[in-house]
């Protein structure tokens, strides 16, 4: 690609994006420079603005450029239902797939002290206040059923002790339409142990 | 993903990148905002600077932030050999795969009058001057063997009429209809070494 150091810098910088390797970074650079500089300029502007202006919702910790995200600000969402997720992207997935009409709380990860993820990093003090506010009737744990996720779920369960909040967990098991033999053993064992009346 | 319009703008803006769909754009946004804002800010800066400052080499038309790219400015490159390619990325592919030590000329496309790609857009006047300068001994056509590529090759062959330039083509081995930059290095090196008279 000739030698332009700025060109190479751009190829390198694009590799910060997940899933972008050296080949695709190079393809992106040539595409933008030769075919769509307007789009490249627009992306540079929006990206810079987003990095500077997007923060976390004061209420639910999801990503937003506002003090309080529109989900938290919406009077149409039931404040007595609180769904606790790991990532902002989990909210998008639940909103698209379900008809849930409550509120959310975003942990931003799972408890993992060795990785520096403790109760403070996950906003668990804020969550505790929420659970003891008297406004929440049910807290739905939509947390990955990993070892760290389970530890996080138990921590939150303990956090709610002494409140009237009912703690529930989304069901984990064999995906709908999934072939039993293609499901990993851990999931299958979990689904088997958690069998319910027909 | 909640509702932030700036968040959605960034997801949309990332889709200008080739190969990036809505899912991967969303993944990129959450990754940058939650895990690597420094990289996002750096990318925004470099991208904006590249769109503004990277132009085309006065000699060979490749992408560069300089008047003349370092390949053209290098006294180590033989000015009697001129390799004619479609895209700046083809130079990178040839440099990586072969031991070619001559110069390049970048057309920026193939002759395709219906798509607005005529001799002017491809810099063929500049190329004609180069071919008749008396400095070039051999011009190697490294153009994709498509219908439009062949038309372009014939146009350049005619352009060299009356000069002493020997016109050669890289050998078949590049798959018919194949994009040069997608060809593996071994095939490209083989095709380059086996170039024949036009
Ligand atoms: Zn919120
Ligand atoms: Zn040049």
Image (cartoon, coloured by chain):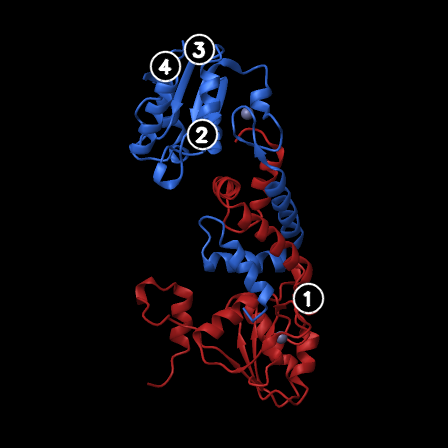
Chain colours: A red, B blue
Q: Is residue B100 visible?
A: no
* Residue at the spot of label 2: B107
SS for dot 2: loop
SS for dot 4: loop
SS for dot 3: loop
Tell me, yes or no, whether dots 2 and 1 are on the same chain. Answer: no
**Residue at the location (62% across, 29% down)?**
B66
Query: Could you tell me how far apart the alpha carbons at marks 2 and 4 are, in whole angstroms?
Result: 19 Å
> A18 or B106, which is in the foreground?
B106
The C terminus of chain B is located in which quarter? top left
Tell me, yes or no, whether dots 3 and 2 are on the same chain. Answer: yes
Chain of the residue displaying label 3: B
**Image coordinates for residue A194, horizontal then vertical, percent:** 42, 78
- Which of the 4 quarters of the picture holds residue B86? top left
- Check disc 2: other Cα within 10 Å, few if <14, some if 14-19, many if 20+: many
* Residue at the spot of label 3: B137
Chain of the residue displaying label 2: B
State whether residue B163 is above or below residue A67: above
Would residue B16 appear left or right of B151 to someone viewing this image?
A: right
Of badges 3 and 1, nearer the viewer stands 3
* Residue at the spot of label 4: B161
Quadrant of the picture in which ligand 1 is shown: bottom right
Q: Which mark is residue A121?
A: 1
Q: Earlier in the sequence, mark 4 or mark 3?
A: 3
State whether residue B111 is above or below residue A31: above
Tell me, yes or no, whether dots 2 and 4 are on the same chain. Answer: yes
Query: Could you tell me how far apart the alpha carbons at marks 3 and 1 are, in whole angstroms?
Result: 67 Å
Q: Which mark is residue A71?
A: none
SS for dot 1: loop
Chain of the residue displaying label 4: B
């Amino acid at each position: 690609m000739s030698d332009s150091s700025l060109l190479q810098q751009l190829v390198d910088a694009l590799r910060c994006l997940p899933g972008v390797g050296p080949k695709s970074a190079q393809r992106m650079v040539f595409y933008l420079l030769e075919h769509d500089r307007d789009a490249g300029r627009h992306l540079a502007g929006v990206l810079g603005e987003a990095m500077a202006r997007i923060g976390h919702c004061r209420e639910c910790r999801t990503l937003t450029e506002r003090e309080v995200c529109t989900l938290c600000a919406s009077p149409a969402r039931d404040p007595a239902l609180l769904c606790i997720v790991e990532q902002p992207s989990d909210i998008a997935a639940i909103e698209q797939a379900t008809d849930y009409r409550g509120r959310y709380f975003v942990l931003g990860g799972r408890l993992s002290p060795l990785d520096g993820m403790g109760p403070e990093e996950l906003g668990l003090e804020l969550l505790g206040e929420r659970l003891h506010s008297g406004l929440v009737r049910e807290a739905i744990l939509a947390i990955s059923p990993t070892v760290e996720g389970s530890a996080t779920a138990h921590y939150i369960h303990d956090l709610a002790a002494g409140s009237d909040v009912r703690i529930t967990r989304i069901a984990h098991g064999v995906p709908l339409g999934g072939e039993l033999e293609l499901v990993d053993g851990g999931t299958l064992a979990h689904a088997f142990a958690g069998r319910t009346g027909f």
